[in-house]
């Protein structure tokens, strides 16, 4: 008879006289020595039935191993495999490298030693409801499921590099890692789903880094608590279905999905993520082919971070609660303990980003992030703005920036802020606010240092203007652009006095190029105003013909001979206003100079003062009075002529400036928002 390997023959389990007994020095013969539960199990395996025992029935781990390996000719095992319900398995069950031909079911059992399945090959293993000291399945290969539903593993579920053809079912289980991880499935390959929900509890880190899961990764309703390290780590994993951390999912410690690839949704609805001194949920660099749900009961006490993530669908944050914590690298870089609630730096969301009806305590960083559609709402924006600026109006706020920027620096850390530098979006959702006031409050909810002169960021303003224009909200876009220029002036960002003066001119007459017809209105108003001034000056004979010969032939004030154009105040004003004249009014008429300042009455008094007069005190007194009045009138007329020359010069200068500015604005030589 051929010798069998140790543990592969029923003869080893004889009583006195058995191989085992003779090896121990007992040479007497005897029957097979088995515990009552083992006899029952032996018969059940032969018949293909379930061996139902009480927890007080003992089955030796070595005898169970003999049956799991297929038994022998005296103890055949049915193709339905070994099926036990309720037994105490004593000793370590060592199946390292074994090829287990049949299904294994150890339900509601107590295994007081570890189960060693390293490198083993088996079909389905069902340990539902069992209590196990530990399970080591490194590089285990299963052609079916690994079922640990409602099981308790008190040391560690260790399955790195394992391959499971169907599901890993840990629903309702309890996993304890007293000195390290509770579950280590790094690099595992699962052909079905990984199920760790329905009140599954893990006391210790859970590691699924670099796992490949064809179906879902479902932790809905699970509870994960780590004394050190991440509570749940799925970094680098590939998940063909959805990652479900929802419906009363709870994590005490960071949940990491760094550089993971998820073909379905990332669902965190009603999930609770608690790590108040650091990161609560991190999915940096992850690629999610569907939708991310951080909504409707989602609560994060710690930073939610998704730097560089790629989300093909929507990002839902509506109804979520985000309580911030300081980010480690922000503290190291800026020596600043600013709390962040949500940080999406360099992320890309191709669908909609829903940010409304949520509670946020901390900053939101969208630096260099891109979303397809931004869907926020006025209450969320108002909440941020009011936390920062209280009831301060936008006009008062702009004055405060120019007068006392230090006030805002003092209150910088006390409020939630939007970091918007580099944030781009294709459009605003139709339900999001498009009005100027709401959007300005959004922009003014940025960190104050990014609104002040030294570190001012123009990109958020330019992006908003661009999107509003593309969506057809032209007036709101213009108002935002005008407000931007006003803010630049209030923080002293315009430049030297000459540029500042041009900036003021550009604002008053054209609203920085956004309302060019405003300049036309100003031009018409100045034209008519100056025409009225010139008419009054002409009536006072302060505007005279430019040619002396013509002027000497005037018999009537303001009239020339029949071959000379009559004075027209409207045409005269228009001729001065237009850079290129052609109306000949400014050529033929001009403000009076020299003797022409004197009107006819002044001339009579001037001549009378030098002609002989009748002697006598009364005649002398009358003459002196006339000369004195004439001098006062002459001085007044000289002042009026000086004022008239100033008006004509300024109108001519305005005409040139307005024409050049209008042409430059309409042709694009001067950018509207420069």
Image: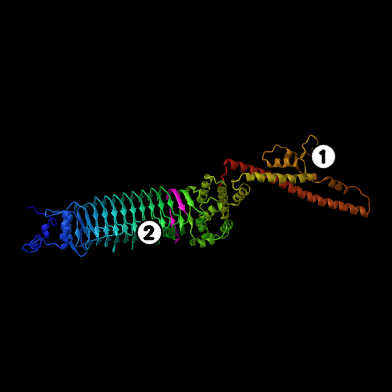
Q: How far apart are marks 1 and 2 (CA)?
A: 101 Å
For label 1, the crowd category at 10 Å Cα-Cα, with few meaning under 14, some 14 to 19 and many 20 or more, is some
Residue 575 placement, left or right of 498: right
Relative vertical location of residue 89 with respect to residue 643 in this rendering, above or below? below
Q: Where is residue 172 in the image (x, y as percent from the top left)?
A: 31, 59
Colour setup of the view: rainbow
Relative vertical location of residue 54 with respect to residue 570 in this rendering, above or below? below
Q: Is mark 1 on a helix, strand or loop?
A: loop
Residue highlighted by disc 2: 248
Residues rendered magenta in the picture: 336-355
Q: Where is residue 60 in the image (x, y as percent from the top left)?
A: 17, 61
Q: Is the magenta stretch mostly helix, strand or loop?
A: strand
Residue 134 placement, left or right of 280: left
Residue lying at 66% horizontally and 46% vertically, measured from the top left: 522
Q: Which one is earlier in the sequence, the residue at label 1 or at label 2?
A: 2
**Outermost residue toward the top in this view:** 563
Task: State the mark number for residue 554.
Answer: 1
Q: Position of residue 83 (x, y in %)?
A: 21, 56
Q: Where is residue 643 in the image (x, y as percent from the top left)?
A: 74, 49
């Amino acid at each position: 008879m051929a010798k069998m390997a140790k543990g592969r023959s029923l003869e080893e389990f004889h009583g006195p006289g058995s191989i085992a007994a003779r090896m121990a020095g007992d040479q007497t013969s005897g029957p097979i020595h088995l515990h009552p539960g083992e006899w029952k199990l032996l018969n059940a395996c032969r018949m293909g039935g379930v061996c139902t025992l009480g927890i007080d029935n003992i089955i030796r781990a070595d005898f169970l191993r003999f049956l799991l390996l297929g038994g022998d000719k005296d103890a055949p095992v049915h193709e339905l495999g070994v099926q036990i319900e309720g037994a105490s398995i004593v000793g370590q069950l060592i199946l390292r490298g074994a090829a287990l031909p049949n299904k294994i079911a150890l339900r509601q059992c107590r295994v007081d030693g570890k189960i060693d399945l390293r490198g083993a090959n088996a079909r389905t293993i069902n340990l539902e409801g069992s209590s196990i000291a530990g399970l080591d399945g490194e590089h285990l290969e299963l052609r079916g499921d690994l079922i640990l539903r409602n099981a308790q593993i008190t040391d560690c579920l260790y399955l790195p590099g394992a391959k499971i053809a169907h599901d890993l079912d840990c629903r309702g289980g309890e996993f304890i890692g007293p000195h390290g991880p509770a579950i280590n499935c790094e690099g595992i390959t699962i052909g079905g789903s990984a199920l760790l929900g329905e009140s599954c509890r893990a006391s210790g880190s859970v590691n699924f880094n670099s796992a490949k899961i064809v179906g879902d990764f479902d932790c809905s309703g699970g509870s994960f608590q780590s004394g050190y390290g991440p509570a749940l780590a799925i970094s680098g994993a590939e998940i063909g279905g959805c990652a479900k951390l929802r419906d009363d999912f709870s994590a005490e410690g960071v949940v990491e999905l760094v550089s993971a690839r998820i073909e379905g949704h990332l669902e965190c609805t009603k999930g609770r993520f608690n790590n108040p001194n650091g990161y609560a949920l991190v999915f940096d660099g992850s690629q999610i082919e569907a939708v991310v749900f951080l909504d409707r009961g989602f609560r994060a006490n710690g930073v939610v971070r998704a730097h560089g993530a790629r989300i093909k669908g929507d990002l839902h944050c509506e109804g979520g609660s985000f309580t911030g914590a300081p980010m480690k690298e922000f503290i190291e870089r800026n020596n600043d303990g600013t709390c962040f609630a949500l940080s999406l730096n360099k992320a890309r969301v191709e669908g909609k980003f829903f940010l409304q009806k949520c509670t946020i305590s901390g900053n939101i960083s969208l630096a260099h992030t891109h979303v397809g559609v931004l869907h926020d709402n006025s209450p969320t924006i108002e909440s941020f703005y009011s936390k920062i600026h209280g009831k301060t109006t936008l006009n008062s706020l702009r004055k405060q920036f120019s007068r006392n920027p230090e006030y805002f620096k003092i209150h910088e850390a006390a409020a939630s802020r939007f970091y918007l530098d580099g944030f781009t979006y294709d459009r605003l959702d139709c339900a999001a606010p498009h009005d100027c006031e709401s959007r300005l409050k959004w922009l003014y909810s940025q960190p104050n240092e990014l609104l002040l002169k030294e570190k001012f960021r123009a990109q958020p303003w330019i992006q908003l203007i661009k999107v509003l224009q593309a969506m057809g909200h032209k007036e709101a876009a213009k108002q935002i652009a005008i407000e931007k220029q006003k803010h630049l002036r209030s923080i002293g960002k315009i430049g030297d006095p000459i540029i500042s003066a041009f900036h003021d001119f550009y604002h008053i007459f054209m609203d920085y190029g956004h309302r060019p017809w405003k300049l036309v209105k100003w031009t018409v108003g100045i034209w008519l105003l100056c025409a009225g001034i010139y008419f009054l000056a002409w009536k006072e004979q302060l505007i005279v013909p430019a040619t002396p010969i013509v002027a000497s032939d005037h018999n009537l004030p303001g009239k020339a001979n029949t071959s000379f154009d009559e004075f027209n105040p409207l045409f005269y004003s228009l001729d001065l206003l237009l850079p290129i004249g052609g109306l000949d009014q400014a050529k033929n008429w001009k403000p009076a100079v020299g003797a022409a300042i004197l009107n006819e009455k002044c001339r009579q008094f001037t001549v009378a003062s030098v002609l002989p007069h009748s002697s006598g005190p009364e005649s002398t007194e009358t003459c002196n009075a006339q000369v004195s009045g004439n001098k006062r009138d002459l001085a007044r007329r000289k002042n009026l002529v000086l004022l008239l020359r100033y008006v004509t010069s300024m109108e001519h200068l305005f005409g040139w400036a307005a024409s050049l500015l209008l042409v430059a604005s309409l042709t694009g030589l001067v950018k509207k928002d420069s």
